[in-house]
Amino acid sequence: MNDTSNAPAIRANGVVFSYEEGTRALDGVDFLCGAGEFVAILASNGSGKTTLIKLLVALLKPERGTVEIDGRDLRSYPPKDLYQKVGLVLQNARDQLFAATVEEDVAFGPRNLGLHESEVQRRVSDSLRSVGAEGLGGRAIHHLSYGEQKRVSIAGVLAMRPSILILDEPTAGLDPAGEIDMLRLLYRLNRQQGITVVLATHSVDMLPLFADRIYVMKHGRVLQSGPPREVFADPEMLDRAKLRLPHIAHLLHEMKHRDGVPIDGLPLTVGEARRKLLDLIPPEIFYRNGAEGQA
Amino acid sequence: MFELFSDIFAGRDNLLRRIDARAKLAVAALAILLSLCSSRPPFPLLIAFSCLAATAAIRVPLSHALGRLLFPLLVSAFLLLLKLFMIGSTEIFTVHVHGVTLVAREEGLYQGIIIMARVAGAVSVMMLLSYVTAAHEVFLALRWMRAPEEIVDLAMLMYRHIFTLIEQAGEVAVAQRVRLGYAGLSRTLGSAGTLAGTVIIRSLEQSVRTHEAMIARCYDGRIPFAPAKAVQSKDRISALAAVLVVLILFWALEGGVV
């Protein structure tokens, strides 16, 4: 298990879970997420990430092992306390949004908490603003685009004012621009509002930009965990997990190992790769190209 | 199909749209009740024509309105045929079909026409209400009127998921169609059956996921609504005037003045 610099917001110890038909979905999973961290659970389909997420929000109960939120056993939380600490965003926004309008849906959680209507309305407008959906309040859910539905589903959870946000494949079904927008939104919530973010995904390309730590899972077990640089330094482990390096890292990994290009370390983002490649290209080439470009 | 269920017109601004949903719902409920209670066709037919005229006035395409009316009218037309050939004693005409003699009778025809008129009146009222009132306002109004919470909650969830299911059914139907699932009668029947089964299974799966998401937002078996605001006096007056007009028309057309 990795140490985190912050106090643990979520800690799962030796969690085992099997479904009724006998499938063992989780087999001794240890998971730790510090307060204020951005943690990704990276796994291919059927590896148990959704099951783990459901266990972290008490929608499923572990056969063995324990889950703690803020140092307290999950089983000792009354639902109203728990869901004001931990918010869950499902993979498919359609499953999450059930009210007729955006405002009604976002207000559902705060009203369940028995808050005064003025506070409910304040939370609705704050949450919609947080996800950049402030103009959507009166719209019917089925008139929203899929990206908008995703944002509104997050707003509905943010209205509970959780300190931990858990998301199941938040970028699934989004176009490339929508994917980066979604991760930027989550990063902003994490860095600016201090919300701990845990997301399950199998999309590897963006994670080095946003995640503080990554858990790689396969067949209900954690294969590896650590900062992105540490996790992506082991391409064979990623292969075993049916995952891959980010495309840019894969390209430079191939250049380094097949073509002998002397690249120091393994860049994980386009920015890092650009800097590494610029270091290798003689400066006169830039000057010549730059002069030609200007001419 | 999606267009037929679409509620885009309820978002358009017009005179009827601006009236409080509770006032509209009260008038609509009365008009539906009286249409269904009418013993002669003129009252429900007048209600139906008034609603259609109002629908045209708020610029809803006639094809859309007729599309919504079509299915209930077809069902009532079928009932009219049953009544025509099965009830009454005064013969109008006789039909011979494959050796079977069917006798159309005046009393049956009259009863059938009354049923059709009632259906047309009641459905037209519902249709107009749906064109000028957003669904969530109707649910809020129903809650305010102390309608059973379980029924209102269920109606709200059904309303939300109708669109999702139509979308999913559309996707499955396309997937079947591009693999010739609707080529020929037997394949069409098979595909349609599979489609219905798939939609039921998906709706069950979705209901489980939706329930989980609701629990994660502290759902305790009751969907909370915003507290209702007081009905404005202009809306009270509008509703009262409309109720009076409906009652007078009913009295005049049913009570034998006309």
Image (tube, coloured by chain):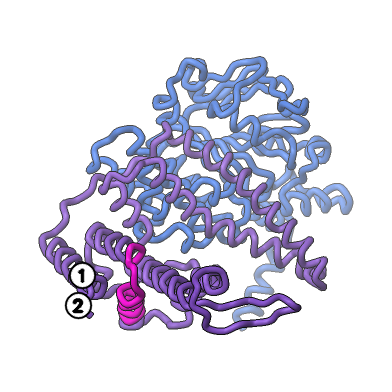
Chain colours: A blue, B purple
- Identify which amino acid the numbered label 1 is placed on: Trp
Report in which chain the residue with disc 1 lies. Answer: B
Image coordinates for residue A82, horizontal then vertical, percent: 44, 26
Image coordinates for residue B8, horizontal then vertical, percent: 42, 70
Report in which chain the residue with disc 2 lies. Answer: B
Residue B241 shown in magenta: no
Instruction: Judge by depth and name the residue closer to the eye, B180 or B102.
Output: B102
Badge nearest the viewer, 2 or 1: 2
A174 sits left or right of A106 in the view: right
**Mark 1 closeness class: few <14, some 14–19, many ≥20 residues within 10 Å:** some
Q: Which residues are magenta?
A: B35-54
Q: Which residue is mark 1?
A: B251
Image coordinates for residue A165, horizontal then vertical, percent: 49, 36
Per the model, the C-alpha gap separating discs 2 and 1 is 8 Å
Image quarter where the C terminus of chain A lies is: bottom right
Residue B43 shown in magenta: yes
Q: From where the camera sits, is residue A247 visible? A: yes
Instruction: Judge by depth and name the residue closer to the eye, A244 or B249.
Output: B249
Instruction: Label 2: state its secondary structure.
Output: loop
Instruction: Judge by depth and name the residue closer to the eye, A96 or A223.
Output: A96
Q: Earlier in the sequence, mark 2 or mark 1?
A: 1
In the figure, A28 relative to B149: above or below?
A: above
Taking the spot 52% from the left edge, 70% from the top edge, the residue there is: B83
In the figure, A156 relative to B189: above or below?
A: above
Instruction: Label 1: state its secondary structure.
Output: helix
